[in-house]
Structure formats: C-alpha cells, structure tokens
Image: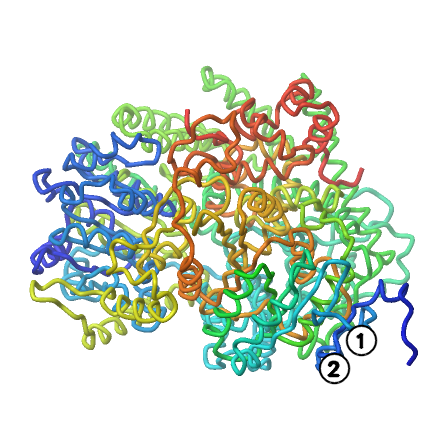
Amino acid sequence: MVQFHEQIISELIEEPPNGSGLVILSSGLSLPKLISSLLLLHSPSQGSLLLLLSPASPHLKSQILHHHSPHARISDISAELPAQQRHSLYSSGSVFFITPRILIVDLLTSKIPASAIAGLVILTAHSLSDTSTEAFIVRIFRSLNRSAYVRAFSDKPHSMVSGFAKAERIMKCLGIRKLHLWPRFHVYVSQELEEEAPEVVDIRVPTTRHMVAIQKAILEVMDACLKEMRKTNKVDVEDLTVENGLFKSFDEIVRRQLDPIWHTLGKKTKQLVSDLKTLRKLLDYLVRFDAVTYLKYLDTLRVSESHRSVWIFAESSYKIFEFAKKRVYRFVASDGSKLNAPAKTSTSKKRKGKGAADGSEHEKVGSSTNVSIVLDEVLEEAPKWKVLREVLEEIEEERQKQALSREELVESEEDGSGIVLVACKDERSCVQLEECITNGPKKVMQEEWENYLLNKVQLRDLQTRYKRKPKQPKGFGILDGVIPVAPAQNAEPSSINKQEHEALVTAASEIKNRLKNDDVGVDPQPAASSQGGGRAKRNVTNKKETPANRKSHENKDNKSNKKAASDGSSLENKGKTDEVDPAAVGGFSEAKGHGASTDKVVLQRYAKVAEATGSGIASKPIPLVHFYALESGQPILDVLMPSVIIVYHPDMTFVREIEVHKAENPSKKLKVYFLFYDDSTEVQKFEASIRRENGAFESLIRQKSMMMIPVDQDGHCLGLNSSVEEQGTSSQNSVTRKAGGRRDVEKEMQVIVDMREFMSSLPNVLHQKGMRIIPVTLEVGDYILSPLICVERKSIQDLFMSFTSGRLYHQVEMMVRYYRIPVLLIEFSQDKSFSFQSAGDIGDDVTPNNIISKLSLLVLHFPRLRIIWSRSLHATAEIFASLKANQDEPDEAKAMRVGVPSEEGIIDDDVRAENYNTSAVEFLRRLPGVTDSNYRAIMDGCKSLAELALLPVERLTELMGGQKAARTLREFLDAKYPTLS
Amino acid sequence: SSPPSPAQNRNAILVSHRQKGNPLLKHIRNVKWVFADVVCDYLLGQSSSALYLSLRYHLLHPDYLYFRIRELQKNFKLRIVLCHVDVEDVLKPLLEVTKTALLHDCTLLCGWSLEECGRYLETIKVYENKPADIIQGQMDTDYLSRINHCLTAVRHVNKTDVVTLGTTFGSLSHIMDASMEDLARCPGIGERKVKRLHDTFHEPFKRVV
C-alpha cells in the first residue's frame, strides 16, 4: 500500500459527522487499490457495505476484486437472487457489489433493512447528476438511515469540471459536504512517487516520409473543416483549434454547444462534426495501424462514407489516400514479361496516381495502353517495429553481460523478474507486435497484404453497388474549390483504373489459388513454383509441428532450407537460442505455473514467443516478452512484476500506474522505455493530456474554495431536497389542489413504473415531485398513472429508432388493446432543442422517411392514441401530476398481468433486462423470417445466436413453424457477403 | 372561382372559413384545399378532423380550445389538435393544452413552424388510406440493408463496421460464430465493440437457467 493512499483514507474517514466525502484523484493513481484498502477497514459489525457500480465499468470491478484479499470475497447482489436471499444478504454485514438499478428497486419495494447498512460507496462519481439514479438512492437511503456514510470516488477529474459547478452539485445531491482532491502534483503524491522513480529512456522514432505527409494532410483537412465550422457561427470560435481537435473531448465541446440547437442545424454542420471525429480517428490509427491495415481502413471508409462525407472531397484528403496507398503498393508497367519485384529499376516505373499530377516521377501515360500494369509491393513497415526489436536486443545483450559478470550466482532472483512488458493500446496491436517479433515484420506485412488483396476485390465490388446514382460531390465553401482533382474514386473507371483493378484482381486470385493448393495438397512441400515468401513460412510451421525431435531435425532443415528461406542469414544463430530459451521457459513455467489464470495466459504467450524465436527468424537473441493491451484494464503490473517496460503507445494513466507500482516496490529495479514518434500528434496528445488534467484540478481547487454546502445541526448536509421540495409543492398546489403535495401522506399519488425505466431519470424526478414509485415488471407500457392511463415514454432518439424497428407500432398496438387512454410521451431533453427539425430541413414533398410522416401514420392508425410533448423531465413530472388529479390510483397487481401471455405462467418481479440478453433478442427479431409469433419459440429452442447460426433448416422449420420462414433465415445467414464472383 | 365539385372535394382538405387569413394555408401545397362549411378547422378525411391552435393565441384565450373541442361532439374518429409552438416559454401553456386535449379525446400534434404544421395536415390527408408498413419495421429487402439492420441492433456498431465484418467473415453466420480474437482483429472495432458483439452472439437469450 502506498502512503498517500493511507493518507487519503484517514482523511476521508475522520471527516465528521460520519466519514462521508467525495474523493477525486488523478487517473492512474490506482483507484482500485485505494478502494480495496478501504474495504479492509470494514467490519461486519458496522453493517453491510454496498459498492454501487454501474454495469458499464467491469474493469474497475475486476481490479478491485484482484486487489482485495482472497479470504474476504466480495459478492454481487444481482437480480437473479430471490428476494428473500437478497434480504438476508443485505443484513449479513458483508461487502457487496450492486448496480444502481437493483438497489433503487429494492429500496422502493422495502426489501432492504436500511438500518443494517453501514454505508454506500459510489465508484464513478463523475457520471452523476441530480437526476441520476444514484442521487435517487441516496435521497431515499438518507431518509431511512441518517447515520450511514456515503463515499464517492472518481479518477476522472476532467469530467468533474465539464459543467457549471458540477462537483458542488454532485456533492449536494449525494448529501456530502467534504471534497478531497488528490492530483498527481499533490505534495504527498509527488514526493512518494518521485522518491524511487524508475529509470526512464525516451526514444524518439522518426516517422517515414509518407507518414509525415499523411499526418500533414489530415491536419490540413481538419483545419479546413474547422474553418468551415466557424463560418456556421454556431460554435464558440475560441475552442475550435486543431490541437483541441486531437481529443475526444473536442466532440464534447462541440456537442455541448450544438446540442441545444442540434435539431435546427443543417445537414452540413452535422456532417462536419462527424467528419472531424473520423479525421481524429485517422490520425490516431496512423500511428497505431500498419500501412496495409491503414489503407484497408481508408478503403472501408470510402465505401461506407463516400456519398455523405464532406472531408473526402477536400484536396488534402485525396493526398491521404494517395500516400496511404504509396506506403503499400504501386503500379509498374510491365514489358510483357512476368517480373519479380527485385527486377525493377526506378527508370521503368510509371507512377499512376489516379488522376493526379504527380510531379517527380510523372511520365506520359497515354502511350502505355499496350503495356499491362503490374503490382509492385512496397509494404512499408512501421518504424517502431524495428526500434522495438532493437530495444529488445539491447536489453538481452545487457542482460547477458550482467549474467557473465555475476557468474550465475545470484541468477535466480534476477530471473524471476526478468520480464519485459510491452504495453500497447489495443489487443490488435499486441497480436501484431507479437507476430512481428516471432515471425519478423516482413511476414506480418505479407500476410496483411494478402488479406488486403482478397478483401480489396470484394470492396471494389461493393463500392459499385453502393454507387447507385452518380451524386454530385457535396463539398462546399473552402472544401468546394478543389473538386476537380478530388473525386477520382467516384469518376468512371478510366482504362488505367481498370488496369489497376485487374492487376489487383490478378494478384488476389494468385493468392486464392495458392491458398487452395495449401488446402488440397497433402504433400507438405507443394509445387516448387510458388514464390519465396510463402515457402519460407510453410517451412517454419512444419518445424513447429515437430517440437519433440526438433534439434536433430533442425540441423537437417538448416541445410535444406538455406536456399529456400528468404532470410537464411539468420539461421546460424538459431541453434544456440534454441537451446537456451526453452529451458528458461520451462523453468519459469514450473515456478509460476500454478498461479492465477492470467498468469497462465501470460505463460502461453511466452512459450510461443520463445519457441518461435528459436526456430530461426531472430537474428539476435531477444528476451522473453509479454504483450499487454492497455484497453483490457488488467492489473498486469502486480501480476507480472516486470523489470523492463516498453511503453509502445504512450498513455498518461499507464505511466502513473507504473509510478505507483514502483513506489510500492521500491527495492525492485525497473527500467521504462517510451517509444514516441518524433514530431507526431502522438507526442502532442500525450503532453496535452497531462496539461488538461492539471487544468481540471486547478479549476476544482478554485471551486472548492468557493463552495457553499448547507448543513443541518447534526452536521449533515442538507442536499438538494429542501429546495426541490418547496418548488415541487408550490407548483403542484396550483394545478392539483386536490391531491396535495408529498406532505399529505394519505393522499400520496402513486405511479407504477416498469423496472426497465429505472435506467432513465424520470422515476427519480417523479419521486422528487412527491409521488410514490412502485416498481414492477410491465409487459405493456412504461408508466401506469391510473387504471385508465398507460404511458409509453420515448426520448427523441428512442422515438426515431423504434419507429424504424417497428417496435413503437407494436407497443402502441398493445397499449390500445388494454387501456382506455393509451399515451405516447415524447420527451425532449432539457439541454437540447425543443423541436424535431429546422424549418429548412422540411423538404418540399411528403416523404415516407420524415418523422412527420411516421407520426402522422401512427396517429391515423391509432386514433385513440394520445400524445404528450414534454420539454423536459420536470415538465413530464408536472404533466403526470396534473393528469392524475382526477383519476383513481393504479392497481399494481392488475397492471402487471396486462398483456402477459397466459402460457408464460407467473412472471415474478425480476428485472427483464437482467433476464434477457436484450441486444440478442433485438438482433434475433430483426432477422428475416423471424416474426412476433415465432421468436419466443426460437429462444426456447436454442440457446444463443451463435447456436442459431449453426442450426440446419429442418430444425429451424420446427422452431419457426414453417419451412418458408426457415429457409429464408437459413439463406440469409449463409449468404455470401458481396464479392466479385 | 367556381365552387368545386364534390368529387374533387374528396381529395382536398376542407378548410373552415374561420381559417381565412391563416398564413398556414400558404404551406399546404402538396394537396388541394378548399373553403367549406365544416365544424372543425380542417377536415382531413371522412372521419379525421383537425383544430389549429397557436400557443400565443391560447395564452390570450385559454378557454378557446375547450369550446372548439366541445363543438366537435362525437362526429370524428380522429380528432387532432394541431398546436403551433410559437412562444419561448412553453411549459405552462403546453401543459394546459396537453391536458385539455388528452382529457377530451384529442390527439395533440406539435409543430414549431407554419411549414411543419402545414406538412402535418398535408401528410395526414395524403396518407389517409396508406397501410402502416413503413412504421411496422418492414424495410428494404435487399441483402445489404438487411444485414446492416441486423448488425446495427448491437449498440455502437455502425455501417463501416458492418462492411468490415462482412468482408472479413464472408457471411452473417460466420460473423455470429466468430471468436473474440477474430473479431478483435478487425480494424476499427475496439475492445468494447468486440465484447458487445461477442456477448450478443454467445450469451444465451435467457440469462436465467
């Protein structure tokens, strides 16, 4: 445990009256460890402790579990547990994870003995607001148990400053009066972390010419888009800089400004917003993906976006495509004879940039009609690959030197921690780097390339399908001037394009044939005519298959392969490494083999790497390497205890984690390498992310000094309730004198609410208004206001979606069937515009896709349907209250039975979403042949979609109750995604 | 102009003389309309009627809507209150209009501009006899839109991802059967999307055993 964690905890729990507080710390300062240390202080005699965690943050949960001591398990309270069991768990005095939705439902249905709860811990404080479920929970909880504590945590300071006085409002709604700030620059923190700082090596890797060019082009296009955006006069100009554009938060800035008027914006502005997002992704991927994958992604973008986007038509974006292509391949005129790559000389090259004036190597194209075009592979490797390799070799060299000097005496100690960890952003990069190390970058690129060619053919075909009508390019403003050069892709395929296409197709079909041969050929050494690269690979795999007698076998192979293998030079070293590495691996795996499951995975990887290294691609020995994806959020440092960390993709949070790890293990040696692309946005981004967090903390410190938190005599925070209460009753009285406010206990209003609705904030606001909320599972409707009134709530986004899916139609149909007054509530969001669209967006004709048309059609088909248009959550609550004024209270038991098919039997009050894989059900219902009447049967008959995908027609016929439907489905599932054939 | 024949009237919106001078009429362009003696403001079909109400007018005459609705009696199956939202502070007036409409069996439609209000009238007239299939979820039947429709049921999966998945795996059944690792190899599909896709396909429909 690091000392500043102790400090945080002691400050927190000593805070009067009961140790409630909001803690905000820098990201990477190991919130999970902090929480698990806090949990150690919990004793069952105090009562149960509930950890509130939304299902959206599984990493946090697994990490807390990891750090938590194994003999005091933390279990989940889930909806699957029967009510009685839940009750006994609540009073058991242990620690539990629970989702806000379950907790609020249990609180409302009085399934929780509130006095048996010692406190609540909220783990994602930054996502709260006064209408969120957590606030609702705390309000009810406080009313039942005054003495329990509420502790909230966040390690995302920048999202704590995203609104006006956000921290203060969150504290009020949680009834917390103390804010604890722990930035990285806090004295205690920085002292401790810098005392035993790890050794750091900063390596700047130069980018290739083409990468620089692409980056420049992307920034140019971004700049153009931003300029265009400024012209709309809808956004604050100050924030619109390219630097800001590099961050995800840029979208937030723009969206926050535009959201209130989003529906009044023109298509172009909206497109610009999404284009900027795409461009940012392209920048990011430029340093993350290899050249081929990058090109593939660009191609995919072009196919899926070309007829909508603005940016694709800008001059510079043409450069992006062009340079991305040059990193991978180029076309070369052949002189009739088949040529192999090395035979090229630069004089014979003819660059055919599509419609481009390519200055340097431009030659007359017209004359070459007879000469066919041949593909020349460039396959530029990512510069970091080579550097990574060198770093690894250097590490190993150093290590061997040390080993020699120390005469293998204290070897064992060093060995246990001799782990080299390479941290990348995503799993994909991990896999690729691993292959790079094992098989050499050439092979990786070759494989990606082959894949690419095969896909390319399919994409081309697809593109022609998408291109139904030759739409005019839609650039405008600045972006407009350049159209003549730009849309080469959309132009009719010229003869050159055709030739290029043919060249691609030929290359692809060659690969296809080769693959086929591989499948058919039983002989491990198939036709000798195939090309070098492919051969070498196959030999390697052969070797792997016979590890038992590898050594003897190998020597033989050595000779026979020397000619065939493309990089035969490396074979000399192979024997040696081969003998050393497996032994090391073996020893290691025995030592650690019985560890946790993560360890096992790690080990497997090791084994693979080491073995392959042995089998001959490596030119120099490299140490054991483990790859780690930052995305996966595993507590990797504490499991592996690496002695060298190579940060392949720099990331602020991970850097902090390394620091904390080092501070916890001050005696261990730790060396950290950073690989940055020089002069790239990668560096900028890293530095700016630190600046941004510091800025957030400074703002929080300022806010803290000016905070006003009302407190009652006992020192409890009064929170927001008091003010809301007054507001609520006064406005209510004017409309609904009869029902009275919340104080009138006998005439308390009741609303029956569907369990699923607790994802939204409306139940919270209704409760604030003084209504009693009764959560049940409803088959029909979301809110039952009275025996007559049933309401289906749709936010704007939901409304559009459920019109498209047809869900709304069926929901309304059900409501109309069972209730006298079926109501559709269209709920706009307070901070977004109160309208569907701008007047300018209403076209000249009645079109079926317009929301007006859909709504009109709904109204025509259900004349009894009533519609409520609500400006905001609070407006909805007011409307509900006024509608209920003269109505009877709804009947809970009856409402539950409505619309439940009788053969389903009893439905208990479990939350539906927890019982069903909702997205799978939705997916299923969208498949052709699946209807309202047969989807339940399908779900009964097979377990999952993956299983469904494998069922034969006969079985489907049984499940779907008809051969026609079954065949439709089967054919759809098996249909080949469009290809050239 | 000469009075229109009854046959023509069937295809036209009949507008009450009360609406004379309403600038809304300018925006009814896709359908014919004629003045006639009707009890509602706009007669949109045999049993469909509409009353027009501007919120600003409602603020001045809060009882107007109620009396107009009462006049309609029980003559129409579909009784629309077409509300033009032309004030800034909508909360109170809209609450009143909503309540009046709801408790007196009227369907409330809101438009934020005269164009929008006009379009509602046109659309309801044009769609008088149209089946509901465009809102019943039946959609384009070609393969690409169908597979798009299916895969985008999984949250955050977009069209670009569909193309990526399609070209990588070849068919929907292969996508549905794909392993985490294979999904993770698709460019542009991040870890969360991979998990979401994989969960959708491999988690059982019903979670309870």
Callout 1: chain: B
Where does label 1 land, which residue?
Answer: B35
Near-viewer residue (B46 or A444): B46
Residue A119 on image: x %, y %: 16, 48
Q: Residue at x 36, y 68 (%)?
A: A162
Rendered image: mark on residue B111: none
Quick check: A954 left or right of A441?
right
Q: Quadrant of residue A831?
A: bottom left
Where does label 2 land, which residue?
Answer: B20
Q: Are marks 1 and 2 in contact (CB under 8 Å)?
A: yes
Q: Secondary structure at mark 1?
A: strand
Quick check: A355 left or right of A566?
right
Quick check: A68 left or right of A79?
left
Q: Quadrant of residue A854?
A: bottom right
Q: What amino acid is labelled 1 in the image?
A: Phe
Q: Residue at x 54, y 63 (%)?
A: A277
What's the distance in space between the residues labelled 1 and 2, CA to CA?
8 Å
Let me know if residue B184 appears in the view.
yes
Callout 2: chain: B
Q: Residue at x 18, y 44 (%)?
A: A114
Mark 1, other Cα within 10 Å: few <14 / some 14–19 / many ≥20: some
B56 is higher (above) or lower (below) than B70? below
* The N terminus of chain B - image quarter: bottom right
The first of marks 1 and 2 along the sequence is 2
Q: Quadrant of residue A321?
A: bottom right
Residue A72 on image: x %, y %: 17, 33
Mark 2, other Cα within 10 Å: few <14 / some 14–19 / many ≥20: few
A567 is higher (above) or lower (below) than B72? above
Residue B200 on image: x %, y %: 51, 37
